[in-house]
Image (tube, grey):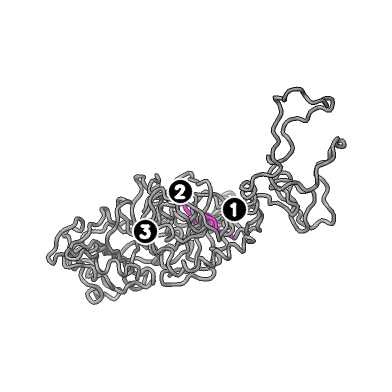
């Protein structure tokens, strides 16, 4: 009996001890961090529309069909889609098969917020000017596609889209009335053109019934051919992952010259001065500044003492400012003192004396290089790709670099201005996925991106200090960098914080490559609609996208700020 009781008590105690383990998770489960959603893309084909198939198919949350009162019936050539129930998304764009094909039409979308109402119709603007160069493998690859600029719409779960070809009147050869006149109204103003506003102006009296080839219609109007493979891309950025604390942000650093600059004594770059100038850094023989930059009460001692007294008098403490190759000291050994008599015949080993003063053009070149080396700016704080949650698995491996950075092209993303600063990482992840998965590029197109709060984000991977070749200015991606400000600035001014961040970023990055923000330079065009391939084009060191391509980018209100950006960036470099 006692054995039976002992056995029963033991079983009960064992079950009681095991019960908390089954109810409460162990320490390993308690410490596990939540896994962020990776993001996704929904691709919906745009098909020919029936006369009333688009707008009547979608009803508002109250159940009433709102389309008949807000939008006209689509033309026979229109293509589109009505998807009232889709997985949540936050960014939209339209793509097609061939990147070289032009979309001669007008694209409009409207979306329904999650648990909310339908938005007005908004424009999707052209995007062919912000792309890899024409002869780049990135654009000529099998994965590359043409597409519109993406538009940030926020969390949505319903969408309508329509593409209307440009109408061409045979009588006068004019373009469609509405397609070009106000194509930017919706996206630039960020409020849309109203429900179908302006869409009927370029409908034409008739169009090709198949939505593709050019065909005659009853009133003599003709519809432009739309590119093949039109589809609507719905991008979900996923949740923001938690990056390691030491990899989220590159902290700001003070300015320092990339190469040693001449001191007040006139020593050449890389040479060690005999005395330190008060308040100036002391440069070692390797060109690396010493840790202490405090003024010295007396001239500093030489870092390397000679082992025995020199036979000849030492050189003057202040050396000439030209390179050693222009020194008056002959390169051949000095003749021996014992041979004091002149030779009866000319010596075959005699070396002609090098002029003590180098040519003027060489002096000017060396002075320009030395002056450029002394100008630099502090590195601003930069949110890394890990900081904004870039999925490194979707981009191509490896990187492509240019030799240098000569020009910083300023862009706007044309994604609209309806985003909060806390949403900026989500906007970046959406654009990144659109560039890689939808357009088929190797990586995010811009080298850097700036939000409305002035925060700077690392763009295309490869190193923020390096000359990474991006996909931002068609024809001028080599030896340049692209800086994009999140938003649309054709009818809205950029924030002062964003403009200041442009100046800080360009001052630092251009200083690494010895560029004067207020100067000009030349780039060779890779081909575009403004400069033919091979043209040597003079550009501002800080230029707008429109300076290299016939485009509205970066918006007239942001373009007006570039003069002050150049001035501020030069001041930050100490010019």
Q: Earlier in the sequence, mark 2 or mark 1?
A: 2
Where does the image place residue 493, in percent across and percent down from the top left?
46, 72
SS label for mark 3: loop
Within-10-Å neighbours for mark 1: few <14, some 14–19, many 20+: many
Residue at the farthest top position = 344
Residue at image mark 3: 127
Residue at image mark 1: 514
Residue 208's image quarter? Answer: bottom left
Label 2 close to label 1 by CB (< 8 Å): no
Q: Nearer the viewer, mark 3 or mark 2?
A: 3
Q: Earlier in the sequence, mark 3 or mark 2?
A: 3
Image position of 189 with respect to 230: above or below? below
Q: What is the tally of numbered marks visible in this picture?
A: 3
In-front residue for pair 549/341: 341
Residue 490's image quarter? Answer: bottom left
In-front residue for pair 262/163: 262
Residue at the farthest left position = 218
| Magenta-drawn segment | 381-395
Q: Let me know if residue 547 is in the magenta part.
A: no
Q: Let me know if residue 390 is in the magenta part.
A: yes
Residue at the farthest right position = 309
Where does the image place residue 248, in percent across and percent down from the top left?
56, 57
Residue at image mark 2: 393
In-front residue for pair 236/545: 545
Where does the image place residue 450, in percent across and percent down from the top left?
51, 63
């Amino acid at each position: 009996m006692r054995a039976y009781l002992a056995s029963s008590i033991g079983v009960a105690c064992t079950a009681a001890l095991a019960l908390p383990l089954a109810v409460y998770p162990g320490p390993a489960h308690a410490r596990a961090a939540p896994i962020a959603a990776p993001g996704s893309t929904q691709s919906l084909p745009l098909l020919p529309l029936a006369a009333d198939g688009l707008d009547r198919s979608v009803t508002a949350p109250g159940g009433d069909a709102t389309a008949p009162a807000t939008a006209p019936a689509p033309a026979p050539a229109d293509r589109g889609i009505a998807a009232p129930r889709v997985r949540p998304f936050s960014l939209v764009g339209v793509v097609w098969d061939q990147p070289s094909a032009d979309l001669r039409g007008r694209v409009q979308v409207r979306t329904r917020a999650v648990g909310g109402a339908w938005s007005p119709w908004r424009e999707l603007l052209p995007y062919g000017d912000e792309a890899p160069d024409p002869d780049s493998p990135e654009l000529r690859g099998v994965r590359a596609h043409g597409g519109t600029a993406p538009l940030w719409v926020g969390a949505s779960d319903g969408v309508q889209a329509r593409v209307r070809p440009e109408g061409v009147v045979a009588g006068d050869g004019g373009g469609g009335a509405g397609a070009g006149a106000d194509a930017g109204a919706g996206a630039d103003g960020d409020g849309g053109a109203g429900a179908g506003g302006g869409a009927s102006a370029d409908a034409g009296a008739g169009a090709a019934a198949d939505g593709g080839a050019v065909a005659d219609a009853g009133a003599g109007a003709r519809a432009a051919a739309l590119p093949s493979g039109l589809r609507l891309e719905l991008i979900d950025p996923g949740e923001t992952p938690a990056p390691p604390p030491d990899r989220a942000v590159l902290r700001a650093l003070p300015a320092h010259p990339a190469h040693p600059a001449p001191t007040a004594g006139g020593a050449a770059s890389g040479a060690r001065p005999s005395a330190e100038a008060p308040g100036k850094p002391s440069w070692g023989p390797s060109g690396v500044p010493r840790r202490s930059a405090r003024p010295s009460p007396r001239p500093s001692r030489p870092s390397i003492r000679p082992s025995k007294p020199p036979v000849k008098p030492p050189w003057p403490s202040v050396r000439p400012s030209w390179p050693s190759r222009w020194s008056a000291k002959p390169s051949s050994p000095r003749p021996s003192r014992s041979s004091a008599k002149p030779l009866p015949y000319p010596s075959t080993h005699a070396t002609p004396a090098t002029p003590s003063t180098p040519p003027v053009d060489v002096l000017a070149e060396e002075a320009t290089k030395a002056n450029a080396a002394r100008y630099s700016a502090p590195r601003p704080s930069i949110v890394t790709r890990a900081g904004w949650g870039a999925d490194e698995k979707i981009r191509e491996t490896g990187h492509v670099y240019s030799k240098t950075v000569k020009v910083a092209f300023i862009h706007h993303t044309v994604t609209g201005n309806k985003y909060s600063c806390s949403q900026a990482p989500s906007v970046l992840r959406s654009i990144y996925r659109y560039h890689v998965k939808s357009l088929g590029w190797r990586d995010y197109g811009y080298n850097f991106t700036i939000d409305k709060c002035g925060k700077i984000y690392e763009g295309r991977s490869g190193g923020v200090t390096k000359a990474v070749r991006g996909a931002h200015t068609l024809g001028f991606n080599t030896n340049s960098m692209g800086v994009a400000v999140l938003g649309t600035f054709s009818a809205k001014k950029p924030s002062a914080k964003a403009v200041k961040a442009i100046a800080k970023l360009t001052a630092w990055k251009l200083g690494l490559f010895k560029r004067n923000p207020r100067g000009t330079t030349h780039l060779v065009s890779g081909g575009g609609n403004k400069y033919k391939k091979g043209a040597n084009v003079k550009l501002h060191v800080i230029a707008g996208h429109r300076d290299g391509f016939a485009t509205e980018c970066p918006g007239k209100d942001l373009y007006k700020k570039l003069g002050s950006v150049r001035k501020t960036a030069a001041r930050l470099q100490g010019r």
